[in-house]
């Protein structure tokens, strides 16, 4: 990797860290609620009635109550990990395919 590419990678990583950290420092004391809560509040504002969900989540039915926050976070992380794994797999396949095509073209020219 050339020096120029290393500098670009470092700058992009720093920008990513800044994007994640900036809201935490700029909005100290703010509550970062989920979109479900915000949606329920907005529906109640528009209709003038309390929002009532259409169905109960499957895990809540199985457990007989709401999932603990830690379990919800774990399930979200597992879902994210699976998604990242799928994306990384296909990106790796595309990169390897491109390398193999370049090797074949090089051999074909000789």
Image (cartoon, rainbow, N blue to C red):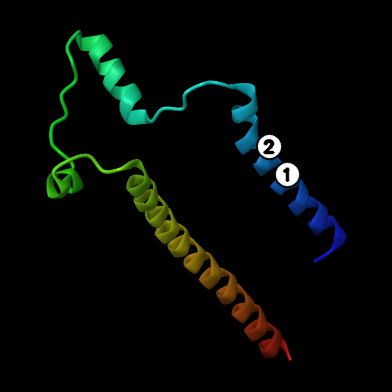
Residue extending furthest toward the right: 3
Q: Is residue 100 above or below residue 3?
A: below
Q: Residues within 10 Å of mark 1 (few under 14, many from 20)?
A: few
Residue assigned mark 2: 18
Q: Quadrant of the C terminus?
A: bottom right
Relative horizontal placement of residue 73, taking residue 25 as reference (left or right) = left
Mark 1 element type: helix
| x then y, percent, for residue 63 | 16, 48
Relative horizontal placement of residue 108, taking residue 82 as reference (left or right) = right
Residue extending furthest toward the top: 48
**Which residue is drawn at the image coordinates 71% and 47% (left, top)?**
12
| x then y, percent, for residue 73 | 39, 46
- Quarter occupied by residue 79: bottom left
Residue assigned mark 1: 14
| x then y, percent, for residue 58 | 16, 47
**Which residue is drawn at the image coordinates 66% and 42% (left, top)?**
17
- Quarter occupied by residue 53: top left
- Foreground pick, 54 / 62: 62
Alpha carbons under labels 2 and 1: distance apart = 6 Å
Circles 2, 1 touching at the beta carbon (< 8 Å) = yes
Q: Is residue 35 above or below residue 77?
A: above
| x then y, percent, for residue 65 | 17, 40
Mark 2 element type: helix
């Amino acid at each position: 990797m050339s020096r120029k590419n290393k500098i670009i990678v470092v700058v992009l990583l720093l920008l990513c860290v800044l994007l994640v950290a900036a809201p935490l420092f700029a909005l100290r004391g703010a509550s970062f609620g989920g979109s479900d809560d915000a949606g329920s509040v907005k529906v109640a504002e528009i209709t003038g009635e309390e929002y009532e969900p259409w169905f109960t989540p499957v895990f809540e039915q199985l457990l007989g109550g709401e999932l603990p926050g830690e379990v919800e976070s774990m399930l979200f992380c597992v879902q994210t990990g699976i998604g990242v794994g799928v994306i990384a797999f296909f990106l790796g396949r595309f990169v390897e395919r491109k390398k193999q095509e370049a090797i074949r073209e090089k051999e074909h020219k000789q």
